[in-house]
Amino acid sequence: MNKVGSISADVIREAAFKCMKCGTCQSVCPVYQETKNESFYARGKISLVEAVMTGKLQLSKDVEKRFFTCLECRRCESACPSGVEVYEISRAIKEEIVGKGDLLWIKKYLFKYLFPYNRRFRLLGRVGNVFYRWFLKDLSPKNPIRGIFGLFGIGKDRVVPPISYNRKGMGIDEIRKLQNPGATFIYFAGCGATYLYYGIIRSTISLLSSMGIQVMFIENVGCCGAPIEASGDLETFEMIRDKNVKMFNSIKADGIVTTCGTCGLQLKESYYDKGFIDKPVFDVSQVILKYGLPAGLKPLDFNVTYHDPCHLSRGLGITKEPRDIIKSVPGTNFVEMFEADNCCGCAGFFTATHYSIAGAIRKRKMDNIQNSGADIIVSGCPGCMMHIAEGIKQRNLKKTTLHLVEFVDMSLQGNGLLKKELAKQARLADDVKTGSGKRQMR
């Protein structure tokens, strides 16, 4: 075997050779903690790679599924004393799997025929919004529609997130041209904010504008390509990347700001660090701290905790900035939850393809949230927000989850909106407990 995917076999051998088989990765892997399966964490996967490369083992479908039973949370890499680049090794094997045509069918079609095309994505968002409001918004646990979920590998007890493409709600048309702005940033919102939580976009535009920052929102930029590259479909990823690069490099700005840890890590590692774009990438928390919170923040008298998204914390090393911002909001009682940097179990497609494992991992996170006594769970990733929000609904908790920018923007607007949100969650929880209401997602 001369190559594994697009990577030289010698490079893979050298990377795998670093592994001392010490088992440190076993102690931190969320998937192993739930499955107790040696082949589902880094040491076991590296042994599988070595066996495949030497011809001792065929890359069968049973072997292939081991590499996709992974959160890509990078806990193994951050804990590894030898610095083994597990992600690169795993992605190379996934390239081989894609080359064989063995990528999961729904990923194959979504990656090829939806993700690269913004118009199709937006059309699906609009259609999805209608379908959601008609059939899924008030979906009771015994609704027969849940029987369809299994056809797509989705757990029947799932709480369906809001699906929408609400351009007006995003506040794009409210972006104003500032006189003498302190800086100009391209805002890359990502798929999660664009099609699930458009309030993140509105709050980001509102907050950064109030800080004197000129926001440039490019509507024709598509998915960053993170789930596609991580799944080994490099051909599709490169097509998406090249489209986005043309857009990014055609605009003069001080940098690119993101509100999703995964998007931020992807744009940094696979775009900026490799020289495809000429602008540095920042998480919104870094921009807020650098240019300063706006004046006029109003007290938010709530207990607040923070969940660290994996790619934001371990990937980009951003943990202090969001906490400093939360603590700067008047009246906030910040409570550090136990194991705040543990993965919530979402990991994008993982929560759809491995829902039972994702749910088991989330259980530990939800226990820690409940024990923290927090009213509000702030995070920096729409995927984490969605997964935690589902946990809140399934447990009927009187809590809510917000993005960091939504939390700060609510402080600018006053705590009325936040009180309404918490009151709504309390009513829903009471309705479910008494059997008088139906579930719905924030």
Image (tube, grey):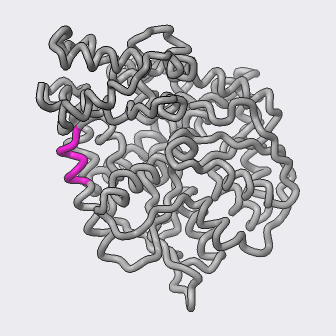
Q: Quadrant of the N terminus?
A: top left
Q: Is residue 432 left or right of residue 256?
A: right
Q: Is residue 225 visible?
A: yes
Q: Is residue 147 above or below residue 114?
A: above
Q: From which residue to which does the magenta span run?
A: 233-240
Q: Quadrant of the C terminus?
A: top right
Tell me residue 435's x, y (percent). Answer: 70, 21
Q: Is residue 309 above or below residue 255?
A: above
Task: Name the residue: 44% across, 70% down.
Answer: 186
Q: Magenta stretch containing residue 234, yes or no?
A: yes
Quadrant in the rendering for residue 298: bottom right
Tell me residue 347's x, y (percent). Answer: 46, 34
Q: Which of 310 and 126 lies nearest the eye of the viewer?
A: 310
Q: Is residue 363 left or right of residue 1?
A: right
Q: Is residue 164 visible?
A: no
Task: Name the residue: 34% across, 20% down.
Answer: 46
Q: Main secondary structure of the magenta part?
A: helix
Task: Name the residue: 54% across, 39% down.
Answer: 310
